[in-house]
Amino acid sequence: MQLFFQENITPPLITLEPDESKHLTRVLRKKIGDHVSITNGHGEVFECVIQEADQKKTILKVLNSSVIPEDGFHIHLVIAPTKSPDRMEWMVEKITELGIHEITLIESMNSERSFLKTERLEKKIISACKQSLKFRIPSLHPIAKLDDILTSNSFLEYQKFIAYVDEHHDFHLFDRAKPSGKYLILIGPEGDFDPKEIEKAIANNFMPVSLGKSRLRTETAGLAAVQILQVLNR
C-alpha cells in the first residue's frame, strides 16, 4: 500500500493538494483508473480511484472508507530539543515510525536550545506516517516550560516518568510501566536535568526510571523510551 495524506477530506470527490498530486503523478507515475489510499490523519482511510491525474490538481473518487481503531495505550514524549535541529528531526521521524501519540518540546535549566521551528518537524511526522502506514498523525506541541509540565493537572490519569542518568537507581522503564496505560515520559537535554528539576518532578509524582546501562544522547533516549513502551504493549 502507498498512503497519501490530506487533512480535509469530503467524499465523494477528493482534490489532492499540489505536493501530493505531484508525488502521485510525477514520482509514482500513477494514472487515471489506478487505485490509491488516502488518510486524513485522524484514523480514517479512504480507498479511491484516480479520475483526473494532474501534477497540480489530482481528483480522486472515494470508493469506500474505514476507521482504524486507536491503540489501547497512549505515549506522550516530553523532550528537550537538541542543539542540532537535524538530530531532533531524525528522532521525530523514527519515533513516528515506531508509534508515538504526542510530542511536547520543553525548555529546562540545562537546555541547549529554547526555540525550534516546528514546521519542518510536522513535515517529517507526516512523511513518516505515510511511509510507515500510520493513519493517525501524532500531536506536536510547541516548546513549554518544564515547570508547567510538572505542575499541570492535565496528566492526572497518566503514568508519569522522568528518565535521567543516575548510577544509583536501577528502576528500568520497562519494569515500572504498566501495560495498556497512558504514559508521560520526560527526557532532558544533553546536560541532563538539574537535580532541583528531578526533585520537583518526583515531588509531583513522576517516577524516576532508567533506559538502560548506556549513557544515551537526548534523541537516542527519546527513541529508546518510545520503543520500550511499544514493546510493553505488544
Image (cartoon, rainbow, N blue to C red):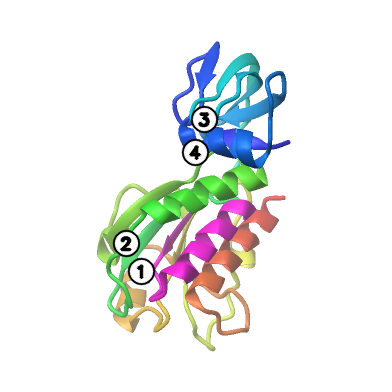
The image shows residue 187, relative to residue 63, as above or below, that is below
Say if mark 4 contacts mark 2, CB within 8 Å. Answer: no
Residue receiving disc 2: 150
Residue receiving disc 4: 19
Give the total number of marks visible in the rendering. Answer: 4
Q: Secondary structure at mark 1?
A: helix
N-term-proximal mark, 2 vs 1: 2
| Residue 55 x, y percent position in the rendering | 54, 32
N-term-proximal mark, 4 vs 2: 4
224 or 168, nearer to the observer: 224
Q: Is residue 80 left or right of residue 224?
A: left
Q: Residue at x 49, y 45 (%)?
A: 138
Q: Nearer the viewer, mark 2 or mark 3?
A: 3
N-term-proximal mark, 4 vs 3: 4
User: What whole-number distance in Å separates the C-alpha atoms at marks 4 and 3?
Assistant: 15 Å
N-term-proximal mark, 3 vs 1: 3
Q: Magenta span covers which residues?
A: 76-98
From this viewpoint, is residue 103 visible? no
Indicate the quadrant where residue 64 lies. Answer: top right
Q: Is residue 158 left or right of residue 133?
A: left
Say if mark 2 contacts mark 1, CB within 8 Å. Answer: yes
Q: Amino acid at mark 1?
A: Ala
Residue 201, label in figure:
1
Is 79 included in the stretch rendered in magenta?
yes
Q: Amino acid at mark 3?
A: Asn
What residue occupies the far bottom of the structure in this picture?
A: 167
Q: Nearer the viewer, mark 1 or mark 4?
A: 4
Q: Amino acid at mark 4?
A: Asp
| Residue 39 x, y percent position in the rendering | 57, 30
